[in-house]
Structures are given as structure tokens and as C-alpha cells.
Amino acid sequence: MAEEINIKSSLSKSEKYAELYPQLQALLADEADLTANLANATAALRQTFGFFWVGFYLVKGEELVLGPFQGTVACSRIGFGKGVCGTAWKEKRTLIVPDVDAFPGHIACNALSRSEIVVPGFKQGQVALVLDVDSDRLNDFDDTDAAGLEKIMRLLEQKI
Ligand code: SME
């Protein structure tokens, strides 16, 4: 499999998720290393959707620690229950935040970030990592993103 992702920019968001999934599946199929796969997943997502910031935080002890990402520099550690990422970890569910300024305890890694979605990934029922996507526009994420990113997370969970 060639290391490339080809998705037309003219497609709708749900069409892009539908096209991305099998391409990502093929891209990850022959690689067992988690870091390599997370890194390629962030690049594929950024390439497909032009996300402002997209990356992973991995559970290490009582904290989330920054993993592979695409975008500007970010905070490297987030506590359990802190910020959007730590809350998604604590509540074990996807969080869509239409306006980060309205989310109590939001951690502003970048002042330009306006809305956010965080999707947890599980290993044996426990959160092992989260996928965090930030937008510089308000209200930029919806159920289509939640469904598309959760499906991708199910794929990545097989690599943990
Ligand atoms: N805003 C996140 C922190 C991570 S950065 O956005 C990359 C949060 O509140 O958890």
C-alpha cells in the first residue's frame, strides 16, 4: 500500500469520512507500532479536513501526556477530569464543545481555538488515549464528526 491519502476536497464532510476510513485502514494495516499509526492518523485527518489542531493524548498514570499531533505546540500534560480532554477521559465519552470559552475549565493551548471535539479510545474498558481536534471557528463539530472520529478510534484501538 502506498503511503498516501487521496480525498477530493469537493466532497461533503460525511463523504470525506466515508472515503477516509478504508484508506486509513489500508495505511495502518501493515504497521503494528502505535506511535507510527497515531502519527499517520493525525496527518491523514489534517490532510483530509484541514483541522486547525489534531492530535492524541495518551493515558500515563494519572495524566494524559501529549502524543503525535499536527498543529501548533500544545500543553504536554492534562490531569484526570481537567479540561475537555480530561473530562472526556473521566466521563468515558465523546465531548463536542461548540464554544470553548463556555466550557468550564477548558485548557487554552492556543488562543485561536474556538471549538473542540474529544473522542476517547479504550483498552479493556479503560480509556487509554483521547483524540482531540480543535477548530479556530465556533461550532465547527457535529454528530458527523463524532461518528466519523469514533469509527477511526475503533480502528486505532486495534493497534494498542
Ligand atoms: N483544549 C484542550 C487541551 C488540549 S489542546 O486543545 C491541544 C482541553 O481543554 O482539554
Image (cartoon, rainbow, N blue to C red):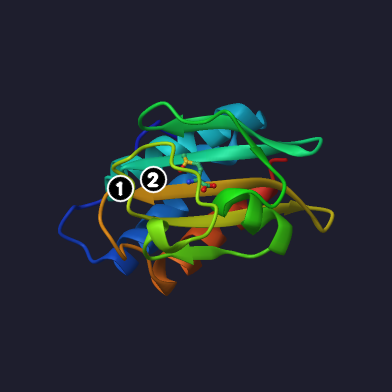
Determine the residue positioned at 58% across, 64% down: 94
Residue 29 in the image: above or below residue 150: above
**Is 99 on the left or on the right of 125, as rendered?**
left
Residue position marked by numbered label 2 in the rendering? 45
Residue 31 in view in this figure: no
Q: Which residue occupies the foreground of this view, 42 or 25?
A: 42
User: Going 72% across and 47% down the picture, which residue do you hit?
Assistant: 80
Q: Which kind of residue does numbered mark 1 sit on?
A: Thr
Q: Which quadrant of the structure image shows residue 126?
A: bottom right
Q: What residue is drawn where x is 66% and y is 28%?
A: 33
Measure the C-alpha gap from mark 1 to mark 2.
5 Å
| Residue 141 placement (x, y as % from top left) | 37, 64
Q: Is residue 157 visible?
A: yes
Instruction: Locate residue 110 relative to residue 128 in the image: left or right.
Output: left
- x and y percentages locating residue 117 in the rendered image: 46, 57
Left or right of 89, for residue 67: left
Residue 4 sits above or below residue 88 on the image: above
Please identify the quadrant where the C terminus is shown.
top right
- Graded by Cα atoms within 10 Å as few (under 14), some (14 to 19) or many (20 or more), the crowding at tag 2 reads many
Residue 41: horizontal and vertical position, in percent? 48, 40
Residue 149 x %, y %: 49, 58
The dot on residue 48 is 1
Local crowd at mark 1 within 10 Å, few (<14), some, or many (≥20)? some
Say what secondary structure mark 1 lies in: helix
Please report contact status of discs 1 and 2: CB closer than 8 Å, yes or no: yes
Place residue 92 in its image quadrant. Answer: bottom right
In-front residue for pair 128/30:
128
- Amino acid tagged 2: Leu
Q: Is residue 93 above or below residue 153?
A: below
Image side of residue 127 versus residue 134, left or right: right
